Every structure is written in structure tokens, then in C-alpha cells.
Image (tube, rainbow, N blue to C red):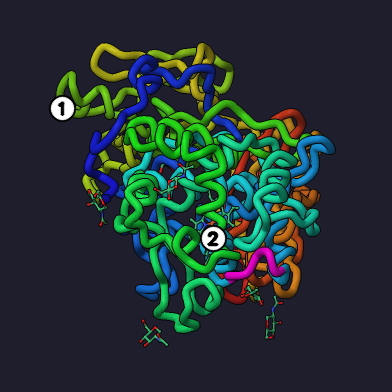
Amino acid sequence: MKVGTFFLSSLPILFVLFSETFGYTWPSWTDELEDIMYLQGGFFHRGFHDGVSPCTFSTSRSPFRNGAAEWIRTAYHDAITHDKSSGQGGLDASLRFEMDRKENTGTQGLNDTFGFFSSYQSIRASMADLLALGVYTSVRECGGPVVQFRAGRIDATSPNEQGVPEPTTDLDTTKQQFAKAGFSEADMIAMVACGHSLGGVHGNDFPEITGNNSEQSFPKFDSTNGQFDNAVVTEYLASNTTNVLVIGPHDSNSDMRIFTSDHNATMRTLTNPNTFRTTCASILQRMVDTVPSTVTLTDPILPVDIKPASIKLSLTNATHLRFEGYIRIRMTERQKQGPIPEQLELPYKDRNGNQCPACVITAKPSTFQGGSGLGFDDWFQFYEFGVDIPSQIAISSFNVEFNDESHDNGGNGFPIHHEILDQPSQSCLLNLTDMTIVAAVRNDRVNLPTYADLEVKEFTQGVVGAVSITSRKVEMQSTGKVLGDYTFFSGRTTVDARTGWFTHYDLVNGEVKVEFRSSALFQGGTSCPQIP
Ligand code: HEM
Ligand SMILES: *[C@@H]1O[C@H](CO)[C@@H](O)[C@H](O)[C@H]1NC(C)=O
Ligand SMILES: *[C@@H]1O[C@H](CO)[C@@H](O)[C@H](O)[C@H]1NC(C)=O
Ligand SMILES: *[C@@H]1O[C@H](CO)[C@@H](O)[C@H](O)[C@H]1NC(C)=O
Ligand SMILES: *[C@@H]1O[C@H](CO)[C@@H](O)[C@H](O)[C@H]1NC(C)=O
Ligand SMILES: *[C@@H]1O[C@H](CO)[C@@H](O)[C@H](O)[C@H]1NC(C)=O
Ligand SMILES: *[C@@H]1O[C@H](CO)[C@@H](O)[C@H](O)[C@H]1NC(C)=O
């Protein structure tokens, strides 16, 4: 299924009721994950679904692999070793340290999954959250229901206990393993049926099950491998299934043992396609929400209604600031009222928090790629602006107005910090590792503590992706260069060559924090740009 074909399937009722995203104010630490989740295609697309689009696509581009199935299996193998009584383990990406265990046979798909997700990892997107987002994305890409995504998982830095059931594991032990992780017998049956809607068994990993050790031997669990549906259930009950975990050798027919363990009662309920969808949405969400007891998950991440994007406020010369960026408007329901608004008005408040009459910015629809960002069930129109504002006036917040709507971000407007300004065009990254971060600090604030909190990734040989992501304080000192109302500060540090161009930082000056800035716009070359 292609992103951009809206309303192809169930639009969750919840989304229709609220035009504002309930309880959300901008900015939020979940903005990054919300972007990855809802900007799958189009303008500003994050391309997360590219690894599973179309549904049978694989990043290794082998016709004998199914990426969407691999993503779901990876989340399952990570989550199921949770111990509910001790609160340990669960969806925490510890699987990356458990690849050599027999119970995780078939590591290529697991490793490929982590490999794809690793380029999305950041201090705001843990590998474990990306695994959960991967279940939402792959199920939805394959035409399945919305598996709600909550954020906040923390990555493990070492292996967890064993306990993934194998095809040869007896039924009692298998039930105990699911029970230990918090799942009943009926949960277990549903979870296996939902999981085994996609993909199949690989002969090179399980030759004793497929009867053929060839890479091309890949018997599917059902006749609709490219579709998240209940064919795995109906074909099992009709006794014409191709699922080798049902019809294969007796000692490894785990699906047969599991499906029949309640005399097919659960499987019979799943013959109703709607029951299958709602059951899978619920059990797969419980699976990805199986987390260590130290983790607190957010409410489900819903599409944000009005969201600034790529906002930049920088000092250009002794008298002016440059303010530019984008505003994203969710059009999913608004399109029923008519075409996209012709323009947005952004009335703003000056540096003292006062509304000045002439302080209105106009934002026009972005035209590149139609200016629209596409999710599975939502679409967004982007508007862009770029203005020069006198430093004496500056900006502290703005509202968004169009047609007869006015949005003030829950009361106080969309906040913009003018106390400390990010100056990526004076910042630099030399030789991939030698980083200088430059900011402009308002002259009356130069004595406040000023530093950058820099995202730092740590890697371990043989483990895919960053093993941990922390932030490191980089002290910033005045350079002594003054331009109008601002003084330039800089901080220098050494970064990992693999991450230098993809790193993030917060700028802090006293109580003010300019968050999640990107090093992608830094200057390269052999020397840093002159500070004016
Ligand atoms: C007792 C429980 C289970 C057993 C014994 C089991 C066993 C297996 C085996 C042997 C394979 C073949 C793997 C390969 O060749 O790459 C497989 C594939 C798969 N399993 Fe399970 N599984 C179980 C439960 C689950 C659950 C609960 C889920 C998810 C909710 C799941 C999702 C998948 C998926 C999506 C595949 C296809 C992978 C691919 O095509 O690459 N499994 N399973
Ligand atoms: C194994 O599978 C491959 C690919 O499907 C096939 O070409 C080969 O003949 C099979 N080998 C046996 C022994 O069945
Ligand atoms: C399996 O059998 C059922 C019932 O006879 C039939 O409707 C269905 O088309 C069959 N499916 C396959 C894949 O053979
Ligand atoms: C469950 O369904 C399968 C497949 O139709 C059948 O072989 C088996 O006998 C059934 N088991 C029970 C207990 O009904
Ligand atoms: C500073 O920049 C603004 C906006 O580009 C421009 O209008 C102004 O003339 C510039 N001032 C000086 C002194 O260069
Ligand atoms: C960058 O690397 C080159 C070649 O290794 C070296 O000559 C130069 O001094 C380095 N520059 C910096 C700023 O570290
Ligand atoms: C997974 O990939 C990493 C990095 O590419 C590699 O070092 C490791 O050996 C792989 N592990 C397995 C089990 O394939």
C-alpha cells in the first residue's frame, strides 16, 4: 500500500474528535518521533516506511526476505524475554546483545532491522522506541490496523535473560514463557497468529523445518504474504495452510500446538476479519508496551495539529535577526471544509512579550513536492516564511492564524528564544571530528552560564547502531566579538567521526534552552568561518 492514498482503511475514531492534539504544546521532546511516525512520505518526509515499502520489500532486496515481517519478529524477540515479576527486560533493544543465542536463530533479519533503524537513532529516538514505531509502520504498510505508539523506552546496554520459545519448545514451557512476560494463553495464541500473518520460515536458518537448506526455500505462513490479514487463521482452520510450523515435522510444529491449545477457540474468534484487526492492534500494542518497570511511556503519539518545523532564528548583522522556518498544518479533516488556506498569518510578540501592530509574518504554501507531508492516515500542508526582524524588536512568540482559525499553542503562543541564538553558519566541523559550536548571546545575559548539551553516541564492536546515547556538556566562552545587541560565544569539542554531521545539541543560557539543533548545517573545510 502506498503512503499518500488517504483513508484506505480505518481512520481511528479518536482522531476525528479532536482538531487540536489534546494536551500537546510545542516544542516537545516527542516531536522527532512524531515526525518519523507521520511524515512517512512527501515534503519533509522521514522515509521510515521505505524499509518496508511495498510490504514484501526487504532492505537486502532479496525476494526471499520480507522486511515488514523482520521488523515485527525483531520486536517480538526483544519483548518476550520480559520478566513481569521482577520488572526486568522487555522492549529495550537488548536483543542486539543476544544474537548468538540459539533461540534467536535467523539473525540476518534481526540485524538488518536494527541496521535500518540505526540511522534514525538520536537522543530523542531510542532504538527500543524505533522498534515499537517499526511495528506500527510495518503493520500499517501491510494494510493492518493502527498499533498505537507510545514513546519513552530506554535502550539496554547489556543482554537480558534468555526465554524466547523455540519451535521445539514444549507447550507448557512456551505458555510459562509467555506468562512470565505477562501474557495469558489466549494472548499467546493471538500474538502468534497476528505475528505469523506476514513472512515465513527460512530454509537456510531452519532447514530441519522447511526440509531444504537453500536460501530460496522460504515457505510462507499463509497465501497472502504481502497483506496483514487473517489468512493465516482461516487457512489453518480450513486445513489448507502452508505454515510449516503447523504442517512441518511433529517436534517443531509449534504453531499447531499453540493454535490448538484451547481447542481452536481463539483461532475461531479470529476468523472474523474485524476481530482479527482489533485483536492484533491490541495484542501488538501490549507487546511493544512490554517494557522494564523503570520505563514510563507517554500517552499515544497522535498527529500534531499545528507544528512549527525547522525553525531558525540567527543574528545576521549589527541590527537584524533572520527568522525563518515552516509551519505544518494537519489537513486530514480540514480538507473537507475546502482547499488549503492560501496563506498563514503569524502575529508575533517582541522581545518584551508585547504584541506590536506591525509584527505579522506571512507564510506561503511550500511548493516543493506540493508542500504536503504524508502519513498513512494523515496529511499535512507546509507553509514557509523568512523575514528580517530588527534586533531591537526581536521575537518571543507567535500565533498561527488562517481562515477563521487562531492557534496559540495552548495559551502562550509558539515560543521562540531570542536570548541565545544558534549560529550554524559560523559553527564548523573540521576533519569530521573537530567541532566548534557558535551562538550569539544577548549582551545583558553574557554572565549567565552558557553551554551546549551535545548528543554523544557510543558504539560497541559487533553491535548494530549506537549502544547508548547521552549528552555531554560543552562549555561555551565569549569570543569577545560583539555585534549590536549580541556577543558571540563558542565551544569546541571532539566528536566521533561517524556521527559528526548527524549530531544534535541544545544551547543553554541561564534558564533558556534552544533545543535539538542539528550539526548538518555546520561549515566544513579546513578552517572555521570568521565570526563577523
Ligand atoms: C512460540 C512462539 C513462536 C515461535 C516458536 C516462533 C517461531 C518462528 C520461526 C521458527 C520463524 C522463522 C524465522 C526465520 O526463518 O527467519 C518465525 C518467523 C516469524 N515470526 Fe515467529 N514464532 C513465535 C511467535 C511469534 C510472535 C508472537 C510473533 C509476533 C507477534 C512472531 C513473528 C514472526 C514473524 C513476523 C516471522 C516471519 C519472519 C520473516 O519472514 O523473516 N512470532 N517464527
Ligand atoms: C531446495 O529449494 C530450492 C529452491 O526452491 C530448489 O531449487 C531445490 O531443488 C530444493 N532442494 C531440494 C532437495 O528439495
Ligand atoms: C482453503 O480452503 C478454503 C475452504 O475450502 C477455501 O475457501 C480457500 O480458498 C482455500 N485456500 C487456499 C489458499 O487454498
Ligand atoms: C483445530 O483445527 C485444526 C485445523 O483445522 C484441526 O486439525 C484440529 O483437529 C482442531 N483441533 C480441535 C481440538 O478442534
Ligand atoms: C542588516 O540586515 C538587514 C536585513 O538583511 C538589512 O536590511 C540591513 O540594511 C543590514 N544592515 C547593515 C548595517 O548591514
Ligand atoms: C586535519 O587533517 C589534516 C590532515 O590529516 C591535518 O593536516 C590538519 O592539521 C587537520 N586539521 C585540524 C583542524 O585538525
Ligand atoms: C550484525 O551486524 C554487525 C554490524 O554490521 C556485525 O558486526 C555483526 O557481526 C552482525 N551480527 C550478526 C549476528 O549477524
Quadrant where the C terminus sits is: bottom right
Residue 110 makes an appearance in the image:
yes
Magenta part, dominant SS: helix
Crowding near the residue tagged with mark 2, few <14, some 14–19, many ≥20 C-alpha atoms within 10 Å: many
Quick check: 486 above or below 57?
Answer: above
Which residue occupies the foreground of this view, 397 or 201? 201
* Residue 203 x, y percent position in the rendering: 48, 76
Q: Look at 80% across and 37% down and name the residue there.
A: 87
Quick check: 414 above or below 268?
Answer: above
Residue 514 makes an appearance in the image:
no
Which residue occupies the foreground of this view, 489 or 409? 409
* Residue 374 x, y percent position in the rendering: 31, 42
What amino acid is labelled 1 in the image?
A: Pro
Assign a secondary structure to mark 1. Answer: loop
Which residue occupies the foreground of this view, 125 or 456? 125
Q: Look at 40% across and 68% down and name the residue there.
A: 219
Q: Look at 50% across and 83% down and name the residue there.
A: 213
Quick check: 280 above or below 15?
Answer: below
Q: Which residue is mark 1?
A: 339
* Residue 10 x, y percent position in the rendering: 30, 31
Assign a secondary structure to mark 2. Answer: loop
Disc with the residue nearer the chain's start (1 vs 2): 2
Q: Look at 45% across and 16% down and name the residue there.
A: 408
Q: Which residue is mark 2?
A: 253
Q: Which residues are magenta?
A: 102-107
**Residue 411 appears left or right of 446:** left
How many labels were placed on the picture? 2
